[in-house]
Image (cartoon, rainbow, N blue to C red):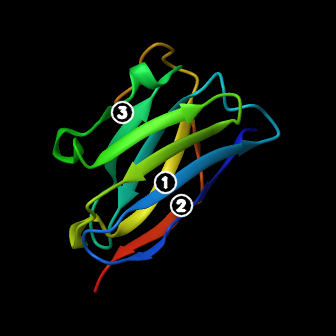
């Protein structure tokens, strides 16, 4: 079974930046579409964005465009979520997820097949 793990989370002040990374163990991440989700305390899980085979397929939620960017490096087996100009409302547990659906494009859905354990991002002064 594909296993995913997130890294790069932590505490940052408003206006700061963080880069989250998603990697896979046992099997290469290359064939999978990858999505990022987040969930704040007391709120439902929210779709952040996703990416298919290449950077050209990357897509993020309209409310996050201009601040969040998703990219992938298939040679390194890494998918990144670059988060800039962070706001307090960005505080959440962030998850990466993989799915065999898609290819040139990534599914904009909540039911991805494989999920990482999540990592905390806290934006606070």
The answer to whether marks 3 and 2 mark residues whose Cβ atoms lie closer than 8 Å is no
Confirm whether residue 112 shows in the render: no
Callout in the foreground (3, 1): 1
Confirm whether residue 78 shows in the render: yes
Mark 3 or mark 1: name the one nearer the start of the chain.
1
Image mark count: 3
User: Residue at point 41% right, 50% down?
Assistant: 82
**Crowding at mark 3 (Cα within 10 Å: few <14, some 14-19, many 20+):** few
- Residue at the disc numbered 2: 118
- Residue at the disc numbered 1: 95
User: Residue at point 66% right, 26% down?
Assistant: 30
Residue 13 horizontal side relative to residue 82, left or right: left
Could you give the CA–CA distance between mark 3 and mark 2, rounded to whole angstroms?
A: 18 Å
Mark 3 or mark 2: name the one nearer the start of the chain.
3
- Residue at the disc numbered 3: 109
Q: Position of residue 26 (x, y in %)?
A: 82, 39
């Amino acid at each position: 079974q594909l296993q995913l793990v997130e890294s790069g989370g932590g505490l940052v002040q408003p206006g700061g930046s963080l880069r989250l990374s998603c990697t896979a163990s046992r099997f290469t991440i290359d064939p999978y579409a990858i999505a990022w989700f987040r969930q704040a305390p007391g709120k439902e899980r929210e779709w952040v964005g996703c990416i298919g085979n290449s950077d050209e397929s990357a897509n993020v939620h309209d409310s996050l465009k201009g601040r969040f960017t998703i990219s992938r490096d298939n040679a390194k087996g890494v998918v990144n979520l670059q988060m800039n100009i962070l706001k307090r409302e960005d505080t959440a547990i962030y998850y990466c997820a993989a799915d065999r659906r898609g290819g040139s494009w990534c599914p904009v859905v909540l039911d991805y097949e494989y999920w990482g354990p999540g990592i905390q991002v806290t934006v606070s002064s």
